[in-house]
């Protein structure tokens, strides 16, 4: 049973934590980008980018169609960076998380919920998405002007089942809004994952985030990998303010 602290009122509707997503489809691509510029870009969060290779950070672009969940049906696009969890030492990837730098959505309810409950940097945009064709495509547009387009080719099937019936892994996502950095515990359970090296095409338009990605070498830099998940369930727990 949810306590009063676990319930938020968004546009007159009660939203209880954890917020659950019962069906979502995801396409994503990861890129190796210069660590120095990436660190400068997310310096406002107080977090440090992970550096899996000398001088390189990891930037991920993803689009998600939420078909069934506590926040309704909507489309979302994400620009995220792999970061070291606060307190992690050295450059090892033993404690890493996803820092969400930019998160357009196409519905106002999830916009308000994401910003007020977790401090996610959600903004309202038009996000046309095509997930039924072989190549998965998405665009983010503001007032008819394209900020970014991403196309992802599916790869080979990858097993996603957990042996012994173990629970879905709990990850950490980080957000920073209005100068406050937060940690959000996040549980994901993907099925029918397909991965491949490369396999993504990015087109950047006229938008500040597009300029930020250009400064990191996109769209010239090839994707390290791309992936498609036709079905995923998720759960988002309460955010916790952190001192990064």
Image: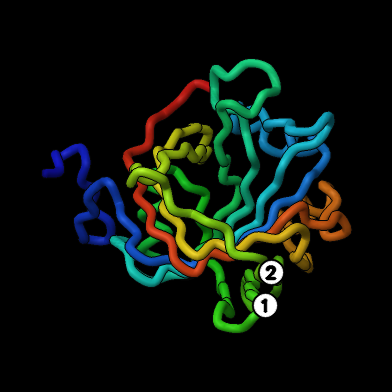
User: Colour scheme used in the picture?
Assistant: rainbow
User: Height in image: 128 above or below 174?
Assistant: below
Q: Position of residue 178 (x, y in %)?
A: 51, 38
Secondary element type, mark 1: loop
The answer to which image quadrant residue 62 occupies is bottom right
Q: Which residue position holds label 2?
A: 152
Q: Quadrant of the N terminus?
A: top left
What is the spatial separation of the Cα atoms under label 2 and label 1, in whole angstroms?
6 Å
User: Height in image: 236 above or below 45?
Assistant: below
Please indicate whether residue 159 sits to the left or right of residue 107 in the image: right
Which residue lies most toward the front here?
164
Residues marked 2 and 1 touching at CB (< 8 Å): yes
Q: Position of residue 68 (x, y in %)?
A: 33, 69
Q: Residue at x 53, y 33 (%)?
A: 179
Secondary element type, mark 2: strand
Q: Which residue position holds label 1?
A: 135
Crowding near the residue tagged with mark 2, few <14, some 14–19, many ≥20 C-alpha atoms within 10 Å = many
Please indicate whether residue 188 sits to the left or right of residue 244 in the image: left
Can see residue 227? yes
User: Height in image: 119 above or below 111?
Assistant: above
Which of the two labelled residues, at mark 2 and mark 1, occupies the earlier sequence position?
1
Q: Position of residue 55 (x, y in %)?
A: 84, 31
Q: Position of residue 221 (x, y in %)?
A: 86, 54
Please indicate whether residue 130 sits to the left or right of residue 122 in the image: right
Q: Residue at x 75, y 50 (%)?
A: 31
User: Height in image: 227 above or below 42?
Assistant: below
Q: Quadrant of the C terminus?
A: top right
């Amino acid at each position: 049973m949810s306590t009063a602290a676990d319930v938020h009122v968004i546009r007159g509707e009660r939203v209880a934590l954890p917020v659950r997503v019962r069906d979502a489809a995801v396409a994503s691509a990861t890129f190796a980008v210069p660590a120095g510029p990436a660190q400068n870009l997310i310096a406002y969060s107080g977090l440090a980018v992970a550096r899996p290779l000398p001088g390189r950070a990891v930037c991920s672009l993803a689009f998600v169609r939420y078909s069934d969940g506590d926040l309704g049906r909507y489309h979302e696009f994400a620009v995220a960076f792999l970061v070291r969890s606060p307190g992690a030492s050295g450059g090892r990837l033993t404690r890493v998380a996803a820092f969400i730098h930019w998160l357009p959505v196409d519905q106002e309810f999830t916009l308000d919920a994401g910003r007020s409950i977790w401090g996610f940097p959600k903004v309202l945009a038009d996000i046309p998405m095509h997930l039924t064709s072989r190549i998965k495509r998405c665009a983010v547009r503001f007032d008819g002007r394209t900020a970014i387009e991403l196309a992802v080719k599916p790869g080979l099937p990858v097993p996603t089942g957990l042996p012994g019936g173990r629970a879905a892994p709990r990850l950490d996502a980080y957000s920073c809004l209005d100068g406050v950095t937060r940690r959000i515990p996040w549980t994901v359970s993907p099925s029918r994952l397909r991965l491949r090296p490369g396999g993504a095409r990015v087109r950047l338009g006229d938008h500040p985030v597009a300029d930020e990605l250009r400064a990191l070498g996109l769209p010239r830099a090839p994707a390290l990998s791309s992936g498609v998940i036709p079905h995923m369930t998720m759960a988002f727990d309460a955010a916790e303010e952190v001192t990064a």
